[in-house]
Amino acid sequence: MIRPLQALAITVPLLMLSCEAGQSAKQIRVVETIESVAFQTPPTQAPGQQGPSPALLQVRQGESFSLKARRNDPKGFTPSGSWTLELFKGEQLLAEWPAVSGYNSKQTADRLWSPGNGAPLPIGTYELGQPEPWGTDLWLNLEPQFETDRSGLGIHNCNPGSGCLCLPNRKDLETLADWVQATGIRKLTIID
C-alpha cells in the first residue's frame, strides 16, 4: 500500500514534468489538497461505542447511566437516520447510534394523539424494557410515562420506522441491548 508521503513524492515530480506555463499554481494546489487530506485524523469514536467494558461500567457517587434520543433535524429525514440515540454516564457521552422514528412523510404529523399515523415518538420519558427476542429481531419495550393514545412502542431494527425508535444497523441494536443489560437502564428520554 502506498503511504500518503510516498504518493506525494511520486506525484510532485510527475506534475512538474507535465505542467505547462500558467498551470503550475493550479497543480500545486491539488498536491496541497492531497497532502492536507492525507494528514487529517479520523473522527473520534465515543468510548462505549463497541459495548460495555468493566472500566466504563464503574460509576462514581451521584453518576448514573441515561439514554436520550433526539431528532437531528425536526423537518428532515435521511436514510441513515434522522435521529440520534445517545448513551451517557453522568455528563459523559459513551455511545451514539443513528436512529429513525416515523415515516419520511410523517415527520411533522401529530406525535401524541394519533396512534398508527406513522409519526415519530412523542417528546417525553419512557420506561425502557429489557431486550427480548422479537421473531429474528430484538425488541426493547417503551412505555410512555405521560398521557398519550400511542402504544405498542419499542426500540428495534428497521428502516424506516413507523413510529417506534428504530436502529437501522443490527450491530448497533445488539450493542445497545448489551448496554441496557449491563447497566440496568430503565428510562429513555425523547428530547425532540
Image (tube, helix red, strand yellow):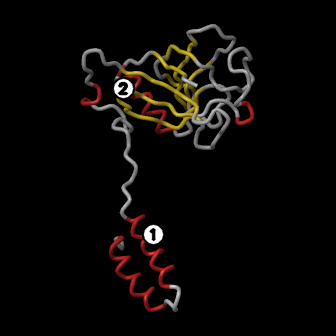
3D distance between C-alphas at marks 2 and 1: 37 Å
- The residue depicted at 63 percent of the width and 7 percent of the height is 147
Check residue 91 in the rendering and tell me which mark sits there, or answer none.
2
- The residue depicted at 56 percent of the width and 16 percent of the height is 124
Confirm or deny contact between disc 2 and disc 1 (CB under 8 A). Answer: no
Query: Dot 2, crowdedness within 10 Å: few (<14), some or many (≥20)?
Result: few
Residue, far top? 147
| SS for dot 2 | loop
Q: Is residue 51 above or below residue 149?
A: below
Residue at which label 1 appears: 33
Q: Is residue 99 above or below residue 29?
A: above
Q: Looking at the rendering, in which quadrant would you find the N terminus?
A: bottom left
Q: Residue 17's image quarter?
A: bottom left
- The residue depicted at 29 percent of the width and 30 percent of the height is 56
The picture places residue 190, in percent across and down from the top left corner, at: 55, 22
Return the residue nearer the eye: 108 or 97: 108
